Image (tube, helix red, strand yellow):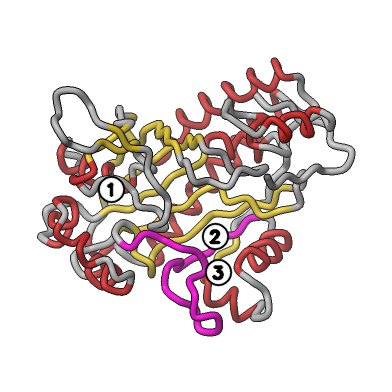
Amino acid sequence: MKLTIPANYNPNLSVKETQEAIKFIRDQFQKEFGREMNLTRISAPLFVTKKSGLNDDLSGIERPVSFDIQGLGDERIEVVQSLAKWKRDALKKYDFNMHEGLYANMNAIRRDEQLDNTHSCYVDQWDWEVVIGKQERTKETLIDYVRLIFKIIKHMEHEVWYKYPQAVHHLADDVFFITSQELEDMYPEKNAKEREYLITKEKGCVFIMQIGWPLNKSNHPHDLRAPDYDDWNLNGDLMFYLPSLDMALELSSMGIRVDEHSIVEQCKAYRCEGRLARPYHQKVQNKELPYTIGGGIGQSRLCMLLLNRAHVGEVQASLWPEEMVEECAKHKIFLL
C-alpha cells in the first residue's frame, strides 16, 4: 500500500456535498465536451472477445479480467481496459464523416493497478475519437486538440467556482508543450516521474509529447505505450499540478492513431508482430478504418483535480485496503 497524507488537509465539502459536486462536474463537462468537440455520445461495450484484438493491451503486462459466457462456447471474453481500438472501429461501422466524432463512458477494471492516492482498480473516463484526414496526421493537429480540451477544462473550473467557491482549485492559464526527449535533456539525471513533477509544478499544466520510443540517454521510453493504437510520434499525456498532493496528475492520454505503416513499425519494435494478424490490425494495415485522433479523460481524476482532493477514492466508489480506509479517515479523507 502506498499512501500520501497531506498536512492539515481539509476537503471543504461534506461527503454529501462532494457527491453533488461530482454529478455537477460530470454532467456539465460532458455536455460542453460533446458540443465543443463535435462528438456524439454513444453506448460502449463493457467487454469484447479476446480474439477480436479490440481490447487495449496498455503496456502489455496488465492482465485483463476475463470470463466465458453461456452460449458462446469456448470464446474468451475480456473486460475492456480502454476503448482505444473499439472507437476507431465504431467510427467506421456507424458511418461517421470527416471531423465528426464520438465519446462514450468507459468503465474498466484494472486488476493489476497499484492502489494509491491516484490509482484505483476501477477506471472511469470519457473515451473519445474523431475522424481526421491523412494529411492531418501532424503535430499541429495534435496540439490544436489539446488546446481545445484544455479550454473546456478551464471553463469547467469557472463553472465549479461559481457553485463551490470554497472548494475549487484554480488551474494554470495555459498548457505548456514539450517532447519526452526534450524533457529528458532538461533533467538528464532524473527519472521519468521526477521529470514530470518538476516541469508540471513549474508550468502548472504540461502536455508531454512523443511517448513510446526509447529516449537517448536512458534508452527506455518515458512511459510504456501499447504499439497498436497511438502513433508514438504523435501522442502525449496531459498533466496538471495538484497542490493537495504536491504532484503531477495525469488527466488525459491521447494521440493521433497508428496508420498502416506505424502500426507495423511499432509492433516490430515491441516484438509483438503476432498481433498484426488480428482482425483489427488487419483493418488498419489494409486502410479499411478511418484515420483518427482520440484519447481518454479521467472522470474521477477531473473531479479530483477541480476539487483539489487528496485521494481518488473521495470522488469514486471502489475497493481499498482496510488499513488505507482507516488511515485516510483519521485525516478527513473519506473514501466512498
What's the magenta region? 205-227
Do the CB atoms of the residues marked 2 and 3 lie less than 8 Å apart?
A: yes
Amino acid type indicated by mark 1: Lys
Identify the residue position indicated by label 1 in the image: 85
> Quarter of the image containing the N terminus?
top right
| Quarter-of-image position of residue 60 | bottom left
Q: Pick whichever, 336 or 137, lies toward us.
A: 336
Q: Amino acid at mark 3?
A: Ile
Q: CA distance from mark 2 to mark 1?
A: 22 Å
User: Dot 2 lies on which element?
Assistant: strand
Task: Check disc 2 and report the residue beneath it.
Answer: 207
Task: In the rendered structure, find residue 76 and report the number of the disc placed on it.
Answer: none
Q: Position of residue 205 (x, y in %)?
A: 63, 55
Q: Is residue 228 left or right of residue 317?
A: left
Q: Is residue 273 visible?
A: yes
Count of marks overlaid on the render: 3
Name which residue lies at 68% across and 22% down: 18
Q: Quadrant of the C terminus?
A: top right
Q: With respect to residue 280, does 37 lie above or below?
A: above
Please tell me which residue lies in front, 250 or 141.
250
Q: Which residue is mark 3?
A: 178
Question: Residue shown at 48%/66% (left/top)?
Answer: 209
